[in-house]
Image (tube, rainbow, N blue to C red):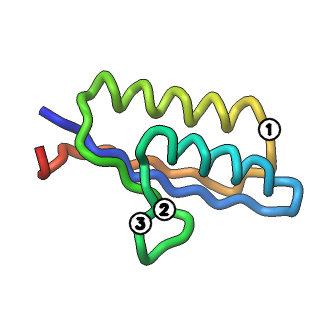
């Protein structure tokens, strides 16, 4: 079984530009790419559950380390159909 992660974040304030840049860089490193029609949503390809957990851990650590003004983050995980 493979999983897919969809990640969306909303940040307010100019001081969050650094956090947005760090998260965007992290997502790119993890091969989690922007969804074409939404600048704040990203989608991963099919990965093992263990790899998905590692991806989520790195993203959440980045969010926790910064302490910016976070409006919301949602993370959706489902079984990938492109196994």
Dot 2: what SS?
Answer: strand
Residue placed at 24% from the left, 29% from the top?
Answer: 48
Relative image position of residue 41 (x, y in whole percent): 48, 62
Residue drawn at the location 23% of the way across and 43% of the way down = 46
At a point 35% along the width and 46% down the height, the residue shown is 5
Task: Residue at 48% x, 73% y: name it.
Answer: 38
User: Neighbour class for label 3 at 10 Å: few (<14), some, many (≥20)?
Assistant: some
Judged from the image, the secondary structure of the residue bearing numbered disc 1 is loop
- Density class for disc 1 (Cα within 10 Å; few <14, some 14-19, many ≥20) is few
Query: Do residues under tags 1 and 3 come within 8 Å of each other at their CB atoms?
Result: no
Decide which of 28, 7 is in the foreground and name it. Answer: 28
On screen, residue 25 versus residue 71, left or right, reads left
Picture layout, residue 83 above or below residue 55 = below
Instruction: Say which label, 3 or 2, has the lower sequence index.
Output: 3
Q: Is residue 52 left or right of residue 20?
A: left
| Residue 19, image x, y percentages | 74, 47
Q: Which residue is mark 2?
A: 41
Nearer mark to the viewer, of 2 and 1: 2
Along the line of sight, the residue nearer the viewer: 14 or 77:
14
Q: Which residue is mark 3?
A: 35
From the viewer's perspective, is residue 59 above or below residue 6? above
> Mark 1 vs mark 3: which is more N-terminal?
3
Query: Decide: marks 3, 2 in contact (CB < 8 A)?
Result: yes
| x, y percent for residue 64 | 70, 32
Q: Is residue 23 left or right of residue 13?
A: left
Label disc, if present, on residue 67 of the rendered structure = 1
Which numbered disc covers residue 18?
none
Q: CA distance from mark 1 to mark 3?
A: 25 Å
The residue positioned farthest toward the right in the image shown: 15
């Amino acid at each position: 079984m493979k999983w897919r992660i969809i990640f969306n974040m909303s940040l307010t304030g100019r001081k969050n530009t650094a956090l947005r840049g760090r998260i965007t860089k992290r997502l790119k490193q993890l091969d989690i790419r922007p969804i074409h029609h939404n600048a704040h949503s990203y989608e991963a390809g099919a990965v093992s559950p263990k790899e998905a957990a590692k991806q989520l851990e790195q993203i959440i650590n980045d969010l926790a380390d910064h302490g910016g003004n976070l409006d919301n983050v949602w993370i959706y995980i489902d079984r990938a159909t492109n196994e």
